[in-house]
Image: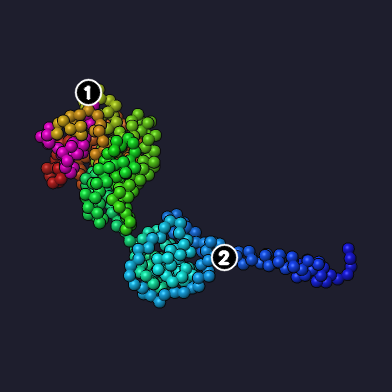
Amino acid sequence: MSEHEPDEHDDPMLVGGSGEPGRRRAASRRRSVPGCIAVLVALAVVVGGLYFVASWGVGAIKDQFDGADDYPGPGHGKVSFEVKKGDTVAAMGRNLKADGVVASVQAFTDAAAANPDSTRIQVGFYALKKEMAADDVVEILVDPDNIVKDTVTIPEGLRVVDIVKLLAKNTDFSAADFTKVLDHPDQLGLPDYAGGNPEGYLFPATYDFGPTATPESILQDMVTRWKQAADDADLESAAADLGYTPQELMTVASLVQAEGRGDDMPKIARVIYNRIEHPDNGITNGLLQVDASVNYALNRSTIAVLTQDQIDSVADSPYNTYKQVGLPPTPIEAPGDDAIAAAAHPADGDWLFYVTVNLRTGETKFTDSYDEFLQFKQELQDYCATQSDRC
């Protein structure tokens, strides 16, 4: 090794060293460019169904050259702006600029970075204006109360006809608009085993419908939510294990929804299965005798205690479970998660009868004895005579 002190011509990292000045100067310049780009950093990431904010990537470098121009506000006109799943802060900024809401992407990203609530911006539509101040835009987007939507709650146990009325009441569409879609059920995404009948498959839940929703998309959303419930209950596998079709299990779920509540639901499901599977028990002869199904045949809201005249008036209906053996041909109403789970996973027991003896509390008694069943019926009649006008 040479002992002399190296000078600038011996150091290859110095400009002009080792006889190749042009090549090393160019290499040095090339190494400096990616070093500059590397200082661009992410703001945040999308978490769950909440938005958010995130990265300035190389694709957003163009935004850095747009400047940070901002409008003074307060703005004018109307703009319906949508925050979509997966949008980054920069993507929102570009969309806002394209819609004429903000003057520059940089102004919006700076305003978002300065607002700690910006990490909680949610998906949805927001009512904005043209030429707004970026800070004002962020203030609107961080408040979920500003999401433009129709919130509709569909309770468990409604028939399709009742669901349509509720949708018409709480959206800008008429009952006829929804009926027109229902007349072509192939648009809804129903399972094949529903046979084109949406009864029981418009799932009861709370929905937020945005301004671009249509009758078709609203009903499709309800069927999609039903599919989630069916998957959660492992409906098709459960039906096969029990020896029924998925459509039959959904019919059982609808009967359970109409007849029970809470912890009683799996027991009611077991009573239904016991009556179907043991028609030779010498008491029920395969008849389910479910009042709710007869009410469906009567096309009226639930009647707690049916009269014989009411039962006889729809004697030929396949939904008259006092006259027709086995299950009705379709669900009679929309079951919720608990009813579907109960039908898929019934309780163990030998019960053949149940009677709700208190309509206010829902107290229901179960037995496999006909004599005890008659005692329960008398208990209900006494309750109706002295404590309730719902019978």
Q: Nearer the viewer, residue 145 or 348?
A: 145
Kind of residue sitting beneath label 2: Leu
Q: Residues within 10 Å of mark 2 (few under 14, many from 20)?
A: some
Residue 307 magenta-highlighted: yes
Q: Name the image quarter holding residue 160.
A: top left
Q: Secondary structure at mark 1?
A: loop
Left or right, 217 with respect to 138, comes to left
Q: Name the image quarter holding residue 85.
A: bottom left
Please say if 204 is above or below 256.
Answer: below
Q: Which residue is mark 2?
A: 40
Left or right, 41 with respect to 107, comes to right
Give the distance between the C-alpha atoms of the residues marked 2 and 1, in whole angstroms: 80 Å
Kind of residue sitting beneath label 1: Gly
Q: Which residue is mark 1?
A: 282
In the rendering, which numbered label is found on residue 265? none
Q: Residue at x 52, y 61 (%)?
A: 55
Q: Secondary structure at mark 2?
A: loop
Residue 33 place in picture, x, y as percent: 64, 66
